[in-house]
Amino acid sequence: MPKIYLSPSTQEYNTFYSTSPQENAANTEEYYMNLIADAMVPYLESNNIQFRRNTKDMNIRQIVDDSNNYRPDLHVAIHSNASPPEFSGILQGPDVFHFPASGEGKEAADYIAEQMREIYPIKELISVLPNDRLVELTGTFAPAVYVETAYHDNPSDAAWIKANINQIARAISKGIAEYFGIEFRDISPRWRGEVSVREGNLNVRSLPSTQANVVGKLQNNDNVIILRSMPDWYLIAADDVTGYVDKRYIKPL
């Protein structure tokens, strides 16, 4: 059974483009990349890919050491990008980096990029690039990829990431499965649920609190993927929204 080290960004200081003064700490690279990693879990488990995951309090050296101690078959870092100051808010598109001398890293990057081309609206902007400066590529023993999902300082890219958390997670997971030669399977039924409200809509929130921002709304009978269960909340993914809902209104299938 193949295993990966899953390393979503811990960069809570990188904020996403937003025009809303109500945006809070849930509008960061760390927040959204960890949502993508959350959404990858059902796909990885459904395809029998084992994983170990970093934690938000780790620094880059701790992440690399933890990955090397785990001895994965592939190290997968998940980030969002930002333009240099002279191009702030202008650059767009996903980039998938690999260490220049790693043929296996390049192969994994190619598979992931090909899946990203299936979902990103401008396929020509997706690149696979060598990089000998990123520590998660130079310091890890395993073949490694560093996925920059899109540019969080660009208005359209930031909005695209927020609206496509589950699609990005599926694309990266499918690319990983193809790298390992696994026939990709979608999420098994045990991860799925259905919205059950008598009237109105179900609020999806940025955090498990009724005081948190509403990031989307779901209707009765909408299908969701249940990513995590808490005493009163589910973290769910739907077509264009990922966030927290009152678990009383979700019926597991």
Image (cartoon, helix red, strand yellow):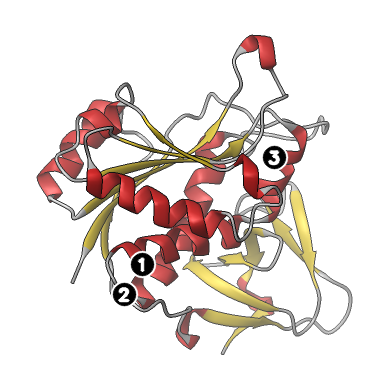
The residue identified by callout 3 is 157
User: On the picture, is 131 further left or further right than 94?
Assistant: left
Left/right of residue 106 with respect to residue 152 in the rendered view = left
Amino acid under label 2? Ile
Q: Which residue is label 2 attached to? A: 182
- Look at the image and tell me in which quarter the C terminus lies: bottom right
Residue 133: percent from left, percent from top:
32, 21
Q: Measured from the top left, where is residue 225 in percent x and y?
A: 57, 73
* Residues tagged 1 and 3 counted as in contact (Cβ below 8 A): no
Residue 157 percent location from the top left of the image: 69, 39
Q: Which residue does the image show at 24% across and 45% down from the upper left?
A: 103
Q: Amino acid at mark 1?
A: Glu
Label 3 amino acid? Asp
- Residue 243 at x, y = what percent? 63, 57
Q: CA distance from mark 1 to mark 2?
A: 6 Å
The quadrant in which residue 137 appears is top left
